[in-house]
Image (tube, grey):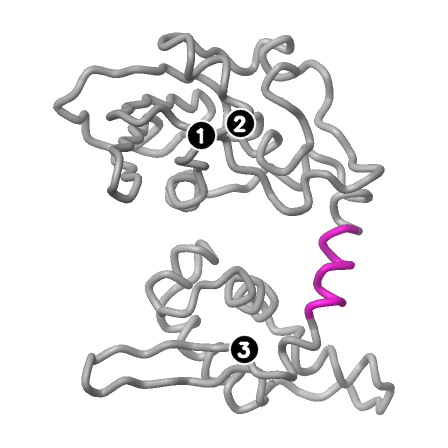
């Protein structure tokens, strides 16, 4: 938006000047997904610094793609898409479909940030498909080189699902051992629970009901059912 113009007046080129700077489309995507608060946007976008997110939101506001709504009484600020941004949905949707069909799964899923992934996962789990009692799940990601390869998910009726890196004071109902690549492949429809188990990349043990209903409570991307999707290789 403040970068040097391309010097061409082609309509597509002009559109690129507005939406091309890094992080612009991911921010618009998460606004599309319903996140409107700065902290939620930062977590949902992933790996973006507060300074850059602030600048990109300011740029989007100046471009007429985002409206900043401040509630002084509550001390909150929300960011909403304008009609101009909403009009971009069709183009963004086609880009996502193209990626599912044309980018190899190993490349598309290789760089996921685990903390961001699990935060998003905890918000999207289909809690209505879980038994109506406290549920504790332990997830171990064997390919995570960071300090927290193990996460716990705690679900209790009437409360939001929590994800943490500290051992909770409850017995574990379900143990899951997998890789980030495998887990993301299931979410994005590049594979399935049964396929990953057969490939030896997903191990699940514990409560029989949770095991059996895993495909029902696991969240999936809205693009998981794209026709012609490129699947993750059957075996490493």
The reply to whether the magenta stretch includes residue 91 is yes
Q: In which quarter of the image is residue 123?
A: top left
- Element marked by disc 3: strand
Q: Nearer the viewer, mark 2 or mark 3?
A: 2
**Residue 80, position as x, y percentages in the image:** 48, 77
Q: Distance between the residues labelled 3 and 1?
A: 32 Å
Instruction: Residue under label 3, please give it.
Output: 81
What residue appears at the point 36 percent right and 10 percent down from the top-left corner?
207
What residue appears at the point 62 percent right and 83 percent down from the top-left corner?
83
Question: For residue 129, which numbered disc appears in the image?
Answer: 1
- Element marked by disc 2: helix
Is most of the magenta stretch helix, strand or loop?
Answer: helix
- On screen, residue 94 above or below 9: above
Q: For this view, does 203 lie left or right of residue 103?
A: left
Q: Distance between the residues labelled 2 and 1?
A: 6 Å
Segment colored magenta: 89-97
The reply to whether the magenta stretch includes residue 42 is no
**Residue 25, position as x, y percentages in the image:** 61, 67
Instruction: Residue under label 2, please give it.
Output: 216
What residue appears at the point 37 percent right and 44 percent down from the top-left corner?
119
Quarter that holds the N terminus = bottom right
Is 179 or 28 nearer to us in this picture?
28
Quarter that holds the C terminus = top right
Q: In which quarter of the image is residue 127?
A: top left
What residue appears at the point 26 percent right and 77 percent down from the top-left corner?
76
Q: For this view, does 170 lie left or right of residue 153?
A: left
> Which mark sits nearer the N-terminus, 2 or 1?
1
Q: For this view, does 26 lie left or right of residue 117?
A: right
Dot 3, crowdedness within 10 Å: few (<14), some or many (≥20)?
many
> Which mark sits nearer the N-terminus, 3 or 1?
3
Dot 1, crowdedness within 10 Å: few (<14), some or many (≥20)?
some
- On screen, residue 194 above or below 91: above
């Amino acid at each position: 938006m403040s970068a040097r113009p391309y010097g061409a007046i082609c309509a597509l080129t002009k559109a690129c000047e507005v939406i091309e700077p890094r992080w612009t489309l991911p921010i618009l995507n998460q606004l599309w997904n319903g996140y409107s608060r700065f902290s939620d946007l930062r977590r949902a976008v992933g790996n973006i610094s507060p300074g850059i997110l602030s600048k990109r939101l300011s740029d989007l506001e100046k471009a007429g793609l985002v409206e900043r709504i401040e509630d002084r009484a509550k001390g909150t600020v929300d960011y909403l898409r304008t009609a101009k941004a909403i009009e971009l949905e069709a183009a963004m949707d086609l880009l996502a479909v193209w990626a599912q069909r044309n980018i190899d799964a190993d490349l598309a899923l290789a760089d996921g940030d685990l903390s961001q992934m699990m935060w998003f996962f905890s918000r999207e789990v289909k809690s209505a498909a879980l038994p109506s009692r406290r549920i504790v799940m332990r997830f171990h990601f064997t390919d995570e080189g960071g300090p927290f390869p193990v996460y716990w998910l705690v679900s209790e009726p009437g409360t939001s699902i929590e994800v943490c890196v500290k051992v909770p004071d409850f017995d574990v109902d379900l143990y899951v051992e997998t890789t980030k690549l495998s887990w993301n492949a299931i979410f994005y429809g590049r594979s399935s629970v049964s396929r990953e188990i057969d490939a030896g990349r997903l191990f699940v043990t514990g409560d029989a009901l949770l095991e059996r209903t895993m495909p029902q409570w696991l969240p999936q991307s809205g693009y998981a059912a794209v026709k012609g999707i490129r699947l993750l290789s059957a075996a490493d």
